[in-house]
Image: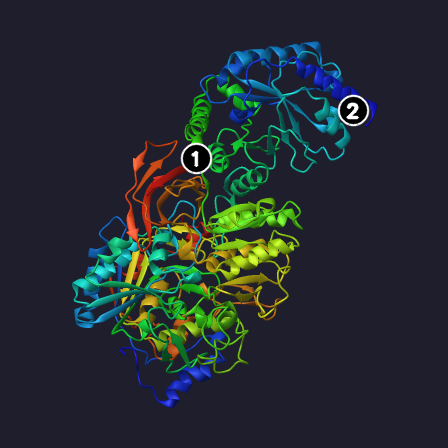
Amino acid sequence: MGINDRVAIAVVGLALLSGPAHAIQPERWIPLRWPHAAPYSPETLELLRGTPINCVLVKWTQGATASDEARRSVRAFAEHARSLGVDVLGVVTAEDLAHGCTDRRESGLAGVVLQGAFTDAPAALAEFRRSAPAGMPVVFLSPGSPRPEGIALFGSLEGAEARVRTTEGDAAVATPSSEPWIDTNLSLVRSMIAARGRPVWLGSSLEKPPAADCFRTIADVAAEGGRWVISPDVSFLEELRRQKPEAVAAWRRISSYLEFFEKHSEWRGLSPAGGLGVIQDSAVKDPEVFGETLNLLMRRRVPYRIIPRPSLGTASLDGLTAVLSTGLPAPTDAERALLAQFVERGGLLVAGSNWSKVRNSAGAYSIVPSGKGQAVVYHEELPDPETVARDMPSLFGRNRLAVRIFNGPSVLCPARISSDGSRMLVQLINYASLPAEDVTVRVAGAWRTARILSPDDAPADAVLEQTGESVQTRIRNFKIYAALLFER
Amino acid sequence: MQHCHKMSRREWLAASGASLGVLGAGIPANAAAPVSPVSIAKCAGYDRDVTATMAAQLDQIGGISSLVRGKTVTVKLNLTGGGRFPGYSPGQTHWVHPQVVGACCHLLGKAGARRIILAEGTYEFESMEDKFLDGGWDVKALRNAAPLTEFEQTGVRGSGKRYSRIKVPKPYIYPAFDVNHVYEDTDVFVVISKMKQHEECGLTLTIKNMFGATPVSIYGDDAGVDEPNEKARESRELICHYGKRQPSKSAPAELDPKSNRYEGYRVPRICVDTAAARPIDLAIIEGIETCVGGEGPWVKGAKHARPGLMIVGRNAVCTDAVTTAVMGFDPRAKGGEGPFNVTFKSHVDPGDTKTADNPMLLAEAVGLGSADLKKIEVAGVPIKDARFDFEAYRTGRNG
């Protein structure tokens, strides 16, 4: 560690010692990133009054060039925020650590956000964590870097604006047998929570991330229990300050979406529904390919839950009819025995080529029957995500999927279920700019009632229709998000 | 079979065999091809009285009571693939609309049809109910449109115990097809199609719609080699479009595996073969709303349009010919001309650019019906008053 690193870390620690005295609860933070170019004016902070936003991220250090006036304005900003019940967090990058916060003093900050790549500053990072004041919450928005212990919450700036991706004009990309390309964060949030637990923040590193129409992204991230870091730009804040009607309407809607998910925070306690378990291991050969497999399974509307490799055991397979193990590099003897037993008892294992050398088909995979079940063994160790996602509904059995939707090409439907199986939450997120109409939702099992809840409309009872061993209901119209809460 | 016309060997050679080699240069009219009236009606929207409009059209072509009373009627739909034009349901653009299907079922039931089977092949062995739901259709309403309405997914064997073999009287490519049993176990066969252009074949009308009667279990890319693959889910590119492989060995192979492998040559002929093997008793072409520039949203440049038209006839070739004229094209256009000037790179020789042949002339040549407008009686709205120029609309010249 260089001298600059030591100085910087020492000063960081000193500055945070004078942080706020009130109880800080990172799990309750609803974040907003303050635009760097916006003034740290207390009056602008008043825009947060009446909204659920209770946490503001500011660029903490501006290096040795920061003026006394700038420092004072940040402090005044943080103090005023505290009076509004808002915690201010200082964003620190690896560059900040290297070049120092040497002119920082009393900051009034409630915590720190480590943002960006710290791969070139591991020693500085470790020292920072070692010397940081006890109890200081640290948010780690740096998924690619070595992760220090004691982090209050994790996140990523690799989030995407949730939407249907368009090409020319408003024509969605499609082929005769496919659907529009949807940008979603659902699988990323699910994967992060499975690996690290909650809370999880997701944001965008875009220069000008869209704020005025970020409701969909808020819903997309919140549907899996994460929080989207709202990032207004300077012009949007200025329009708000001037009470421009469009900006005010957008701001109210953002607020109503945030409120909706806080009002239903108990949904975060529900577990992903579905009979498919996907084994996730950080040591997977190609994390991006595996991540895309999760993403495309979500986009193909295959309900699944993630089994982190350390949790892989008999209990983790309870209730599953299929396991996808392409993300499990070099299974141990114990893992192999466990999965082989799962197949023997009638389960379906979908594995990569490291599972078996059998090759009885010229296609993408071979089928290896065993006991009452079978293993589908792809001929590649980490098969093409699109192939796996496309094959999975038919391998699993379309009619055995926990949830299916019809007439919703731009709609995804992550589903969650209570531990006792008495409640099922099906969340419908429409990624298109136009409302979704006449969407039929079919849920396996005997459900007695269902309630429709949405930030945009009043709650209503759904009309359920029995169809085979499922129930289905038709949603006439919704704009961005609707939740169906089924009860036995 | 109403369209069958006995031809002498000389007529046959003149009309088909000998002319096959000169298709690119045009085919002489087959004077012996049967002719039947065609009705054109304007219908401004699906919220208008589609049923009354269609009823009047059916009357104009002679009524359907004698055709369907007490009979089993199979109705082949045109639902094609997924994807959407933003802001439109599939029925407004590239599928037939449920209002039109419902109206047809209602009128068939009212005319005395004993049983109606709605048939279509779907991808990924999706059931018909689920396919309908995927289009936002009201399945209950459709079931209630007639006393007994059933659904059959014909991309696979479906509810039958075995496939039915339907023979092609004068084949171009295949001597016979193995198809879902409903195409054989029916007294009357109705085809409802969308009035559309097609990226590779030029037009998607009644004859082209018959391409979808071939089950993907036998003719799909993942069809079984020996036996049908009842879990097939791929389209018919390798076998039908390109002729790179043969259907499952359980079904008849094509006549000449060394014939032209180019899809602009093969697909129109296969469509005519299927239309000949399963004679069509009633053709309904729906163009109340549709898309121009291609058969679906996956075709670059395709867009929504409102021709506001329905066309109905007893003879598929006549009906397609009149519709082609209404769309602003010459139904007697040579291969590669008019709507068939759909240049794209040949998979056989990527350096070569190909076009499509005219299926109406191919059908006429084998005696399925006349594509000669001078011979076809048009009831209802005259062609000139009904014309909706697809190319002009696509290119923005009139829209």
Where is residue A406? Give x, y as percent: 38, 50
Of labels 1 and 2, earlier in sequence is 2
The residue at 51%/39% (across/down) is A162
**SS at mark 2?**
helix
Structural crowding at the residue carrying mark 1, measured as other residues with C-alpha within 10 Å and reported as few (<14), some (14–19) or many (≥20): many
Q: Amino acid at mark 1?
A: Trp
Residue A479 in sight here: no
Q: Are marks 1 and 2 in contact (CB under 8 Å)?
A: no
Structural crowding at the residue carrying mark 2, measured as other residues with C-alpha within 10 Å and reported as few (<14), some (14–19) or many (≥20): many
Q: Amino acid at mark 2?
A: Asp
The residue at 33%/41% (across/down) is A487
Residue A319 in sight here: yes
For the image, the number of numbered tags is: 2
For label 2, the residue is A5
Q: Chain of mark 2?
A: A
Where is residue B70? Give x, y as percent: 17, 71
Left/right placement of residue B78 relative to residue B186 reads right
**Image quarter of residue B153:** bottom left
The residue at 33%/80% (across/down) is B31
**Disc 1 to disc 2, how far (Cα)?**
43 Å
* A293 up-or-down from A422: above or below: below
Left/right placement of residue B72 relative to residue B234 reads left
Spot the residue most to the right: A3
Asked whether the residues under marks 1 and 2 belong to the same chain, the reply is: yes
Where is residue A367? Give x, y as percent: 54, 66
Q: Chain of mark 1?
A: A
**SS at mark 1?**
helix
Where is residue B236? Give x, y as percent: 48, 68
The quadrant of the image that shows the N terminus of chain B is bottom left
* A450 up-or-down from B12: above or below: above
Q: Which mark is residue A267?
A: 1
**Image quarter of residue B250:** bottom left
